[in-house]
């Protein structure tokens, strides 16, 4: 059986709690061996940590999502620094910039983004980047902060092939999910074709961005093989190759062995 890692799944959300054991069993049935559960707010961090501590196959990322940047406070840096000592915490994330919903606090987002990169560099953990409608500023800050020294993954990559190539030059990884299965998702499909396998991660972003043919319903980490199969077809290679290389990439990046 092929083995996979879902590098981004919000399994702590309410959507999953009623049938949680069944979800993990379905993941095992299709070869999804490990799942990274990212934080969104400081308040939800304890919930994420409690969840991953209960399940050997789950690991955490902790941090403040850009849309929640106003929630960062004077004690946040040391709070996350302490939480990140937990061996189940493998990254700082998801962090970054999101100009899609509200541009009124872009400066706060940028300051919190920079601070969380500083934290990642101090504790020597990689970062998971949320970049929505903010490509130029995201790349500028990542380069200025020399974020590549700790490792960077561009979660739910939504840029062009040219931006992907710029990321690759910096050594950043590209994470692709269910969007590559959407009929009219031209740009993501082009990126999937062009991205070198050695810089690729698979993710679901569950419960969001559910792949075809389940689009419109709740997304689950056990849909990872569907995403892998679509990427394999776009690249003209086998799903076995996609599974093996992306899993190895994620194991090294997140230090999961």
Image: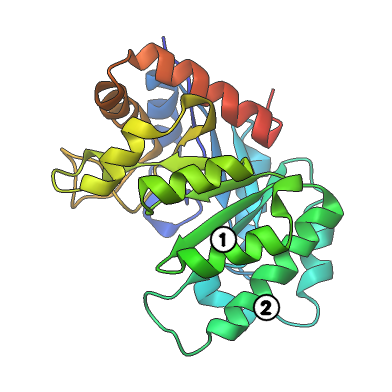
Mark 1, other Cα within 10 Å: few <14 / some 14–19 / many ≥20? some
Q: Dividing the picture into quarters, in which one does residue 181 lie?
A: top left
Write the residue at 54% across / 40% down.
168
Q: Is residue 219 left or right of residue 91?
A: left
Residue at the limit of the structure toward the top, as seen here: 1
Question: Disc number at residue 172?
Answer: none
Looking at the image, which is closer to me, 210 or 145? 145
Residues at marks 2 and 1, CA–CA distance in whole angstroms: 14 Å
Give the residue number, with chain letter if any, for mark 2.
111
Where disc 1 sits, the SS reads: helix
- Name the image quarter holding the N terminus: top left
Q: Residue at x 61, y 56 (%)?
A: 93
Q: Which residue is mark 1?
A: 139
Q: Residue at x 41, y 48 (%)?
A: 162
Report helix, strand or loop for mark 2.
Answer: helix
Q: Name the mark nearer the viewer: 2 or 1.
A: 1
* Residue 79 percent across, percent down from the top left: 80, 67
Q: Mark 2 or 1 closer to N-term?
A: 2
Q: Is residue 28 left or right of residue 199?
A: left
Residue 161 in percent (x, y) is at 37, 45
The single residue placed furthest to the bottom in the displayed view is: 104
**Residue 17 seen:** no
Q: Is residue 121 left or right of residue 2?
A: right
Q: Is residue 189 above or below residue 57?
A: below
19 or 34: nearer the viewer: 34
**Residue 139 appears anywhere in the view:** yes
| Image location (x, y in percent) of residue 117 | 72, 61
Between 78 and 105, the one lying in front of the other is 105
Q: Classify the position of the C terminus by image quarter.
A: top right
Q: Is residue 27 shown above or below 13?
A: above
- Residue 235 in percent (x, y) is at 30, 23
Mark 2 surroundings: few (<14), some (14-19) or many (≥20) residues within 10 A: some
């Amino acid at each position: 059986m092929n083995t996979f890692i879902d590098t981004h799944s919000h399994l702590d959300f309410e959507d999953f709690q009623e049938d949680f054991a069944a979800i993990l069993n379905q993941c095992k049935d299709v070869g999804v061996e490990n799942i990274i559960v990212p934080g969104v707010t400081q308040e939800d961090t304890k919930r994420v940590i409690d969840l991953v501590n209960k399940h050997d196959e789950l690991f955490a990322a902790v941090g403040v999502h850009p849309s929640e940047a106003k929630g960062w406070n004077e004690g946040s840096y040391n709070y996350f620094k302490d939480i990140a000592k937990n061996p189940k915490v493998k990254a700082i994330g998801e962090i970054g910039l999101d100009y899609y919903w509200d541009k009124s606090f872009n400066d706060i987002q940028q300051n919190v983004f920079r601070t969380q990169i500083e934290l990642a560099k101090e504790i020597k953990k990689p970062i998971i980047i949320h970049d929505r409608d903010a490509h130029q500023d995201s790349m500028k800050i990542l380069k200025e902060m020399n974020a590549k020294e700790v490792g960077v993954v561009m979660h739910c990559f939504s840029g062009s092939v040219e931006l992907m190539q710029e990321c690759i030059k910096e050594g950043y990884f590209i994470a692709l999910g269910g969007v590559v299965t959407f009929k009219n998702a031209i740009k993501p499909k082009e990126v999937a074709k062009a991205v070198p396998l050695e810089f690729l991660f698979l993710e679901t972003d569950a419960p969001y961005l559910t792949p075809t043919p389940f689009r419109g319903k709740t997304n689950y980490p056990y849909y990872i093989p569907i995403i892998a199969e679509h990427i394999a077809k776009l690249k003209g290679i086998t799903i076995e190759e996609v599974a093996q290389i992306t899993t190895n990439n994620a194991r090294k990046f997140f230090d999961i062995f």
